[in-house]
C-alpha cells in the first residue's frame, strides 16, 4: 500500500512538473535544432535539466517522437487526460 501511494504522489508531481515546464522542453528542442540542424533522437540528448516529469527509478513521463520530415510530438498524461504539443503548437489538454 505504501508503494502504491508513493508511486501515485511521484506520478502527480511528475505531471505537475511537465505542466509547468513543458514549454521549456519545446524551447530546448528548438535551440537544439537551431544549433545542430536536426532534432535529437531522444530527449536524453538535450542539456541536463531540459526535460520534465522525472520519477525516481521510472524515468520521465514525458514522451517524445520525431515525426516524418522535421517535426516532433510531445505528450504526457494518464487515463483521464493527455497534454500534447508539437514543434508548431504549444501544449494543450485533451480528455481521453
Image: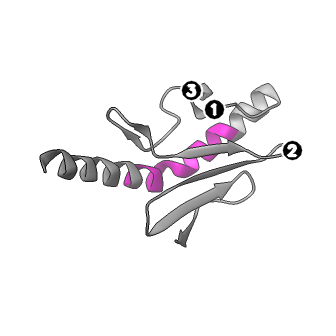
Q: Secondary structure at mark 1?
A: loop
Q: Residue at x 51, y 46 (%)?
A: 62
Residue 58 in the image: state x and y as whole percent: 38, 36
Tell me the residue that label 2 is attached to. Answer: 69
Q: Residue at x 38, y 55 (%)?
A: 16
Q: Residue at x 46, y 51 (%)?
A: 18
Question: Relative to residue 57, is residue 87 depicted above or below?
Answer: below
Asked where in the image residue 40 lies, by quadrant, the reply is: top right
Q: Is 91 in the magenta? A: no
Label 2: how many residues lie within 10 Å, few (<14), some (14-19) or many (20+)? Answer: few
CA distance separating discs 1 and 2: 16 Å
Mark 1 vs mark 2: which is more N-terminal? 1
Tell me the residue that label 1 is attached to. Answer: 42
Q: Which residues, given as a range, are shown in magenta?
A: 16-29
Residue lying furthest right in this view? 69
Tell me the residue that label 3 is attached to. Answer: 47
Residue lying furthest left in this view? 2
Q: Nearer the viewer, residue 95 or 47?
A: 95
Q: Secondary structure at mark 3?
A: loop
Q: Secondary structure at mark 2?
A: loop
Question: Relative to residue 48, is residue 90 depicted above or below?
Answer: below
Our reading of the magenta stretch's main secondary structure is helix
Residue 20 in the image: state x and y as whole percent: 45, 54
CA distance separating discs 3 and 2: 23 Å
Q: Residue at x 70, y 60 (%)?
A: 89
Residue 23 in the image: state x and y as whole percent: 57, 51
Q: Is residue 46 left or right of residue 9?
A: right
Mark 3 vs mark 2: which is more N-terminal? 3
Amino acid at each position: 500500500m505504501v508503494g502504491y501511494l508513493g508511486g501515485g504522489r511521484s506520478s502527480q508531481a511528475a505531471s505537475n512538473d511537465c505542466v509547468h515546464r513543458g514549454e521549456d522542453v519545446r524551447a530546448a528542442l528548438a535551440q537544439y535544432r537551431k544549433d545542430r540542424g536536426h532534432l535529437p533522437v531522444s530527449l536524453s540528448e538535450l542539456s541536463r535539466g531540459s526535460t520534465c516529469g522525472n520519477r525516481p527509478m521510472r524515468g520521465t513521463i514525458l514522451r517524445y517522437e520525431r515525426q516524418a520530415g522535421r517535426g516532433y510530438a510531445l505528450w504526457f498524461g494518464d487515463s483521464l487526460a493527455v497534454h500534447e504539443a508539437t514543434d508548431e503548437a504549444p501544449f494543450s489538454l485533451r480528455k481521453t
